Amino acid sequence: MNSKKIKKYVTHNVNDSIHTGQLLKSYFKSRRIHKSALARNLNRNIGTLLNYQKNSTIQVAILWEISQVLKHNFFDDIACKLPPEFSSDAPVQTLQSERIVELEEELRIVKAERDVLKSVLGGGK
């Protein structure tokens, strides 16, 4: 039997790679997250949670679970660090675009109403 330990994953040496442990640690600190309470909510011991902060990588399922418990999208935080020219299958945020169009139309109407009021008030003097 082979006694060599098989690695579960390979970490590539990339200069601009993200350290997920630091990402979590920074979030916990800035939001004053109590790690003991978070560990209880994750059904893990505090040591495991502290290890997540030390490791440069984390399993997607664990990060998903932490995101769910904290109601924070760490995946979006990571995605923002990628170059904008990278492709994605994520749905386009159309809600903001639709709202902008609505507000532009409302602004056009308000300006037209303002111009009418100016002409009515200005013409009566």
Image: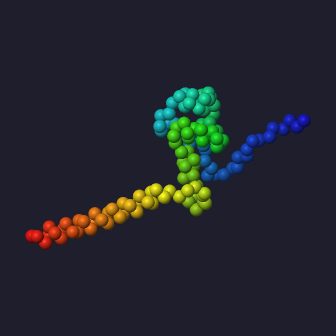
Please state which of residues 120 and 6 is positioned toward the viewer in this rendering. 120
Q: Decide if residue 6 is on the left or right side of residue 108.
A: right
Q: Position of residue 106 (x, y in %)?
A: 33, 62
Confirm whether residue 25 shows in the render.
no
- Whether 5 is drawn above or below 100: the answer is above
Residue ID at (21%, 69%):
116
Residue found at the far left of this picture: 125
Which quarter of the figure has residue 110?
Answer: bottom left
Please state which of residues 97 and 75 is positioned toward the viewer in this rendering. 97
Q: Decide if residue 17 is on the left or right side of residue 103.
A: right
Numbered-mark total:
0
Which quarter of the figure has residue 98?
Answer: bottom left
Q: Position of residue 75 (x, y in %)?
A: 57, 47
Here the colouring is rainbow
Residue found at the far bottom of this picture: 123
Please state which of residues 45 and 120 is positioned toward the viewer in this rendering. 120
Confirm whether residue 11 shows in the render.
yes
Residue ID at (61%, 60%):
87
Q: Quadrant of the C terminus?
A: bottom left
Q: Position of residue 41 (x, y in %)?
A: 56, 30
Residue ID at (48%, 38%):
30
Q: Quadrant of the N terminus?
A: top right
- Whether 10 is drawn above or below 89: the answer is above
Residue ID at (54%, 36%):
69
Which quarter of the figure has residue 35?
Answer: top right
- Whether 39 is drawn above or below 16: the answer is above
Q: Position of residue 38 (x, y in %)?
A: 55, 31
